Amino acid sequence: MVSSYPLPEGFSEFDVFSLGSCLLVEGLLGFFLNAVTMLAFLKVRELRTPSNFLVFSLAMADIGISMNATIAAFSSFLRYWPYGSDGCQTHGFQGFMTALASIHFVAAVAWDRYHQYCTRTKLQWSSAITLAVFVWLFTAFWSAMPLIGWGEYDYEPLRTCCTLDYSKGDRNYVSYLVPMSIFNMGIQVFVVMSSYQSIAQKFKKTGNPRFNPNTPLKTMLFCWGPYGILAFYAAVENANLVSPKLRMIAPILAKTTPTFNALLYALGNENYRGGIWQLITGEKIDVPQIENKSK
């Protein structure tokens, strides 16, 4: 990697190249998988249902995360952020909004699955569209706050991507972090946990599990848990005392979200997987449907 720019503090040449490579793989793989997910929804008529619209919306959010990761990878290979301060704010806003939206849509899918398997009620288009619009507006609001002074966007330790600045840990940061986390992570984790617990009990009674109900919550916590721990640690201690390499683990894991979500909610969904197969090969696969009642 040839560059005249100095290495970020705390990172070696190998570190920068390795992290950039991780971001690039995450970005491209996540983009490809979620692009296929979205294209299948748009092209295969049988997939265009309200429930699958939530999966489509999740893929849209995750494509945003993948694009964010790809830009960060490019900057990592350059060793510096080439887009200036305004670019950093834009990158931070876009990455934060799509990340929050992804978390919300994971919870929305869990809520829909609960009703699908436990109450046998069918999601209506009006509810699905209203929910999606609300998620995007709600996450845009919370992501815009750092742009006007409540919270702040700044560089990650690698200084080649931007996110919510946790380095100061001041009153402004804490006052933003607590309500933002409750409304954009805490509630969503509760919805995912309670929904899949109910589904697991239902599967146990019927003896016919359609998927592993423990995986979504574990995946969610694996991807976003380290970021949450780091964010709240910064609220009580000086996060700058933590090794920059260690702090970079959080964004690296977070950007695996698009890949895991595509595998779980599109390729891991029997109905959606059949639609993707039909998109690629033209061969239609009949998938048994769950009998639901409209509500």
Image (tube, grey):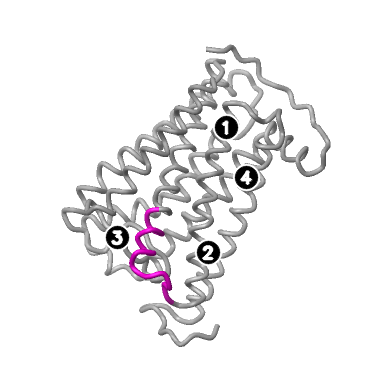
Gap between marks 3 and 4 measured at Cα: 31 Å
Tag 1's secondary structure? helix
Q: Residues within 10 Å of mark 1 (few under 14, many from 20)?
A: many
Q: Which residues are magenta?
A: 80-93
Gap between marks 2 and 3 measured at Cα: 20 Å
- Nearest the viewer among 42 and 279 is 42
Q: Position of residue 160 (x, y in %)?
A: 42, 70
| Residue under the point 59% across and 23% down | 203
Tag 3's secondary structure? loop
88 falls in the magenta region: yes
Q: Earlier in the sequence, mark 4 or mark 1?
A: 1
Disc 3 marks which residue?
165
Q: Position of residue 208 (x, y in %)?
A: 66, 23
User: Which quarter of the rendered picture does the N terminus lie within?
Assistant: bottom right
Q: Earlier in the sequence, mark 3 or mark 4?
A: 3
Residue type at numbered disc 2: Leu
Gap between marks 4 and 2 measured at Cα: 18 Å
Q: Nearer the viewer, mark 4 or mark 2?
A: 2
Disc 2 marks which residue?
23
